[in-house]
Amino acid sequence: MKRRWVISGIALVFLICAWCLGLKPAGLFPPDAEHWSRTGEFFKAALHPAFDYQDPNVPDDADHIWVKGFKGLLLTLKFAFAAMSLAVPAALVLGFFGSSAWWPEPCGPVLKSVLRVVFFASRFFMSLCRSIHELIWALLLLSAFGVSPFAGMVALAIPFSGTLGKVFSELIDEECLDAAKALKAIGHRPVQTFLVGIVPSALPNLITYTFYRFECALRSSAVLGFVGIETIGLYIELSHGEFYYREVWTYFYLLLAMIIAVDFWGAGIRKHLNPEVAGR
Amino acid sequence: MNREERVTELRRTKSRNWYLRISAIVVVVMVAWAWLTSNPLFGRLSAERRWRNFQNFVSELVPNPVDKSGNWLDAIPWAWELLSGDGFVALMTTLGIATAAIILASTIVLPFMAMANRRFSRKDPFGLPGGQVSAPVAILWKIIGPFVRFSFVICRAIPEYLLAFLLISLLGLQVWPLVLALAIHNFGILGRLWGEVVENADAAAAKQRLASGTSRFNVFGTTVFPDVFNRFLIYFFYRWETCLKDATVLGMLGLLTLGKLIALAKGFHWDRMFFYIMLGASVIIVGDMFSSWMRSKLR
């Protein structure tokens, strides 16, 4: 396809979307005086994050706002870690069945069709898991089982195992298969080939991608606060509801700092796993 | 050397990396802590109570007319009514928001690509001799790269749902806040993904043209960009797919996308809620298939 047609096509699609949604440049600004003053206040508060509660009714024995914020961060981390610890094993199993690199070499027609069915079933299952957003999973699970930390963790883990599993299987299938072929040729079983011949060479990529998903899990875990699970998102929503913008900014800065720190941690891991790539 | 000695030898010379080791320990400790400190893990309801809740919940998911008549054919007019009511409009809005947001994000991020790149964004791109550069300009090129890259980090660190929530309170309940929220978040993500593509691209042609005196923005637009165009599109479609999923739930903030219908039906019409969730999932699966088809064509 010609590049210019692709670019014009994309521009045209944008215009159609803007027209259908009624996007007007005026919408980029607050609609009336009340919203203007609220916007002003909101950004003024950005320069003065709260060092003490704005809420006058806080009991005396309550934690300091920064302590509360840090506890919120820990709760956010907790959901992300717990969810990833469920999602990674599930994704490894799904990714194994969703890849074809380990299939035995001389493969009878019956076995081949069985493997094909398993392959497509696991691919379909993964795409079903990830096509429902984690917030909606949370809504469903909380409605079905009542509010509990476990429901929140599983709600995060389901779509993440779908995405991780899909990418794992693709990474595994894109791996160079010389070692696997050699192992098969000297009589290794498929599972042995997979564990010894394929996984070790794909491991740096798998870990890098898992860490990237962990960053996403952290963001999603913060957002779970909006459906009533206690993470820092819940504190932001509550303070925002009372128009305590300076408290909102305190929590917001803490969240941002944590996510950026994890981002740099991940960059470090990438660099140490793959020195020659990172050094370029 | 016998086998044991060889194994000890290998073990002794194995590369050890303190950074990765400490990271692994931190991860294990955090996972253990996450599970051990969540009390009560399953909430305060008893196990039978949870089981009854679950059974009730599942029976509520059956479409209302089917529940009455026991005939699954009755679900068809029911589904059609939901779809032709708000369902279809919500579906199109979701699609429109995701598409507009990703196009906006990629348009804005494009000019920054020539500035965020470690090889481009310096006073002498690729270290090639390029004549005299005044001191302020040299300093500017020194700070502009880290600055743009850090702005990518900040933009992608903000969860899009939170951003949309805050923007709605400032801009009022309309479509722009959702589009902007998705666009800002994806600006940061595309900045990183596209940046990696540019850094891994073959630099020979770009160097050649820079050495012959062409300006860096010219080189980026006419040499690098055409070269990496397909790989840019691959990530463009990948992010579009993600936007589609996020746009669905952003409606829970009150705008007519599927998320709003789901949030409204929740607690009163579980059957409708389940229908809208499945509608959203099927759109995302179709979008997913379209995007992987496009990406496989572009590879």
Image: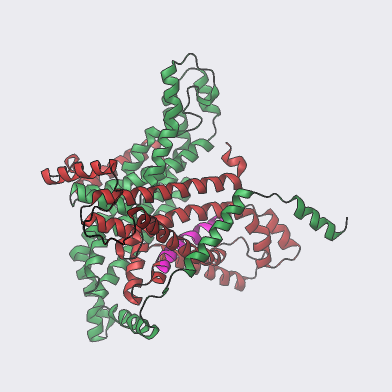
Residue in the picture at 47% in, 31% down: B224
Residue B54 placement: quadrant = bottom left
Most prominent secondary structure in the magenta stretch? helix
Q: Which residue appears at 27% of the width and 70% of the height?
A: B273
Q: Residue furthest left?
A: A33
Q: Residue at x 35, y 67 (%)?
A: A138
Q: Nearer the viewer, residue B283 or B294?
A: B283
Q: Nearer the viewer, residue A182 or B193?
A: B193
Q: Is residue A122 left or right of residue B6?
A: left
**Along the viewing direction, whichever of A269 and B297 lies nearer the viewer:** A269
Q: Which residues are magenta?
A: A153-173
Q: Which chain is red?
A: A
Is residue B264 in view?
yes
Residue A237 is situated, as x and y percent measured from the top left of the image, at: 27, 57
In reply to whether residue A157 is colored magenta, the answer given is: yes
In this rendering, would B217 be left or right of A280? left
Q: Is residue B85 magenta?
A: no
Query: What is the x, y in percent for residue A15?
Result: 25, 42
Q: Position of residue A73 (x, y in %)?
A: 40, 56
Say left or right for B200 vs A182.
left
Work out whether A68 lies above or below A37.
Answer: below
Whether residue B276 is situated above or below residue B137 in the rendered picture:
below
In the image as oriented, which residue stretches furthest toward the top?
Answer: B132
For residue B89, which quarter of the picture?
Answer: bottom left
Residue shown at 27% from the left, 55% from the top: B94
Q: In the rendered picture, chain B carries what hue?
A: green
